Amino acid sequence: MSPGRGQWRDAWRRLRRHRPAMAALVYLAVLGAAALLAPHLAPYAYDAQDLALGATPPSAAHWFGTDVFGRDLFTRVLYGARVSLLVGLVATAVALCIGVLWGTVAGYLGGRVDAVMMRIVDILYGLPFILFVILLLVVFGRHLVLLFLAIGAVEWLTMARIVRAQVMSLRHQEFVLAARSMGFSTPRILFRHIVPNTWGPVIVYTTLTIPNVILLESFLSFLGLGVQPPAASWGLLISHGVESMEAYPWLLLFPALALFTTLLALNTLGDGLRDALDPKTAGDAP
Amino acid sequence: MLRFIAGRLLQAIPVLWVIVTLTFFLVRLAPGGPFDTERAVSPEVRAALEAHYGLDAPLWRQYLDYLAGVLRGDFGPSFKYANRSVTELIAAGFPVTAELGLWALSIAVLLGVGAGLIAALRPRRWPDHLAMSAAMLGICLPSFVLGPLLALLFGIVLGWLPVSGWGLTPGDKILPALTLGAGYAAYLARLTRGGLLEMLSQDFVRTARAKGAGELRVLLVHALRGGLVPVVAFLGPAAAGLLAGSFVVETVFQIPGLGRFFVQAAFNRDYTMVMGMTVFFSTLIVLFNLLADIALVWLDPRLRGAAGQGGGR
């Protein structure tokens, strides 16, 4: 279980044969580029209102139609992608850092330290985090940074468990012994020798965490606890779309489609990566 | 078994204590008091309000009072609904949410385990692909997208089912329960399939087949018990997800349950209400995890030493 350069190449070859995963990868790359370049690509400003125009169905001038304030929905969905992808990446990065650090230390040190650290993870698992995230947002206001931290703090637990299991299976292997006998320091052994070898499962789980995080942000924005107007996020657009779906169904359909396709692409890519990198964990945490 | 249950119960106590303490201090640390937001209040009125809600006592005193209240099932008065206690409001909303959750869970288990069984019976053939594609669809369609879409299609365009209320018109429970259950059905289908396929590769299944047992009998009698382990492990944490889902579903379908109360309380900054419901929900979830753990050990006695490791959130 220590993919060297050749094994990475094998994994890439396996992934390339996985057609749905490659399609998902292309879709995500296009979406990511579009989100990054949104200010240049978007035909209108995301908060430009045209009250005289009002809500209009999709047309050549407004591909996804306009909302009740006459704002271009295509532009707003594009800007929504920025929020959703940003939250997805940053919050996942937070979870990744905490989880890898926690899991590595617990797994490498073992013994009583490990027992205490994993006990903490067990207890945190039992907490209904979604309630605390909402509580946090209610109490401290709805900042984007807080949203990152709150969501990241939820998602690191499984990562810590996965990394710990990996590290425990690695720490008695010969290359670690060799590194130690050469007098390398513990941090150097951990981060130069052990952590790189846990990357397979970590990449798979990271890919599957991003859609969860995007979902959580959309959920909070849908409830009105996430991103605040006039900023746009898919959850917020969907919640506005629901309010007027009888009269203007396109206001619900397009943001919903954007969220759905992105989640589908990320989950498909995650499944493909799992098959390519780490066939053993297939069927583990859904 | 009894010792195991007692041990897990004892473990639940510190978890619940952490929840109550965390909730209490999070809310008390909030910048600005609960009466700051609206219009300015004269100092006398503020003092009277603070005395009424016990906010004039020192913090440790308030904490101990709250802890004692929670132990008695008393979450204090609501900040926004004058003259109603949080406990009353919870008691009013809980039966609705519980019923919704129960229907949703039944749908999820029926559809999910059913689809998983079909998929495992014909792996890598079209029934499997169909079931797994449907499951992927369910996973990528969150309740706040699925609910409105179902309401739009069946309620407004086709006009077959009512789209709001709870127990007022016949059939108004169908769409909310389906919305809430669909995502879990999808996860359960994947877990059931995975669990069953793993069991089917075991030696005892080969023995059963060698003795001439039919494929369906092998699946239902021999593989199902072990194959259900990941399913049950998922059901405990799923309770937490169902509650979170009820926030959305009850808002979308205008159901007077706890989920909608919680969202409204969050908007109104009704601190006692949010605190009370957080503690109440958490207790439910801890209880559900406990039940799932007990069921797990019953299904697979080898887990007795390692219980409490159930996956999910």
Image (spheres, coloured by chain):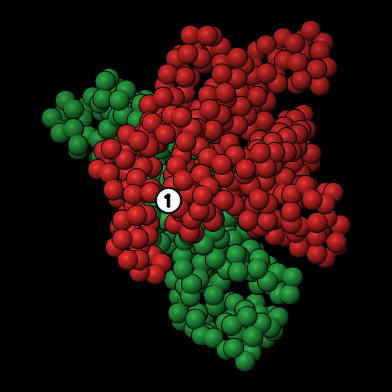
Residue A109 location (% of width, % of height): 25, 26
Residue at 31% over, 40% down:
B62
Q: Chain of mark 1?
A: B
Horizontal side of B166 relative to A137 (left or right) equals right
Q: Secondary structure at mark 1?
A: helix
Q: Nearer the viewer, residue B43 or B303?
A: B43
Q: Nearer the viewer, residue B63 or B311?
A: B63
Residue at 57% over, 23% down:
B291
The total number of labels drawn is: 1
- Tell me: residue A198, above or below residue B289: below
Residue at 54% over, 66% down:
A236
Residue B191 location (% of width, % of height): 63, 33
Residue A263 location (% of width, % of height): 58, 55
The residue most toward the left is A183
- Tell me: residue B121, above or below residue A261: above
From this viewpoint, is residue B112 visible?
no
Residue hosting label 1: B271
Residue B140 location (% of width, % of height): 62, 52
Q: Nearer the viewer, residue B306 or B17?
A: B17
Which picture quadrant has residue A166? top left
Chain with green colouring:
A
Q: Residues within 10 Å of mark 1 (few under 14, many from 20)?
A: many
Horizontal side of B216 relative to B85 (left or right) equals right
Chain with red colouring:
B
Residue at 34% over, 54% down:
B48
Please state which amino acid type lies under the numbered disc 1: Tyr
